[in-house]
Image (tube, helix red, strand yellow):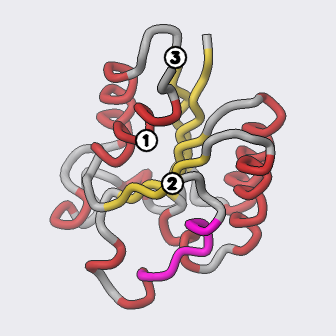
Amino acid sequence: MSTVLVLNGPNLGRLGSREPDVYGSANLDDLRALLVTCARDGVSIDLRQTDDEAELIHWLYEAVDERMPVIMNPAAFTHYSYALRDAAALVTKAGLALIEVHISNPHARETFRHTSVVSAIATGVIAGLGFDSYRLALDFVTAP
């Protein structure tokens, strides 16, 4: 069985109640259920969320060490965390997929959200499709 690591950054633990007009009314448990349902046979989903930048970085190290593809919504860290970017680069340099996802479309929001320090090293970026951003990323990282 292979495992896909699904990482979520700050404030995403508040999905369902935080800005439902932007992020919808579903929460992380709903996202987990969707991904488990959509996962191919033999694929397990390890979905995590943290508001702590260091913890997110250590999870990326774990992905490299355990050879797990990553789907990551860096949330606010997207725009300024060079430490996170460097840790994410270790994933792709190890030959593993790292898909950056966003529930909303950052380019349709405030100007400061238009820049991602992660995108340039990510295998791909999917944004603006709600939880379908994650589902599409899962399809990609588990494609035969």
Q: Residues within 10 Å of mark 1 (few under 14, many from 20)?
A: many
| Picture mark count | 3
Residue 69 percent coordinates (x, y): 63, 36
Q: Which residues are magenta?
A: 114-120
Q: Residues within 10 Å of mark 3 (few under 14, many from 20)?
A: some
Question: Which label's residue is closer to the chain start, 1 or 2?
Answer: 2
User: Which SS does the magenta portion mostly show?
Assistant: loop
1 and 2 marks in contact (CB < 8 Å): yes
**Residue at far left of view:** 21
Q: Is residue 142 left or right of residue 57?
A: left
Q: Secondary structure at mark 1?
A: helix
Question: What residue is shown with label 2?
Answer: 124
Question: What residue is shown with label 3?
Answer: 43
Question: What residue lies at 39% left-to-right and 31% top-to-bottom?
Answer: 32
Residue 50 percent coordinates (x, y): 58, 52
Question: What residue is shown with label 1?
Answer: 137
Mark 1: which amino acid?
Ala
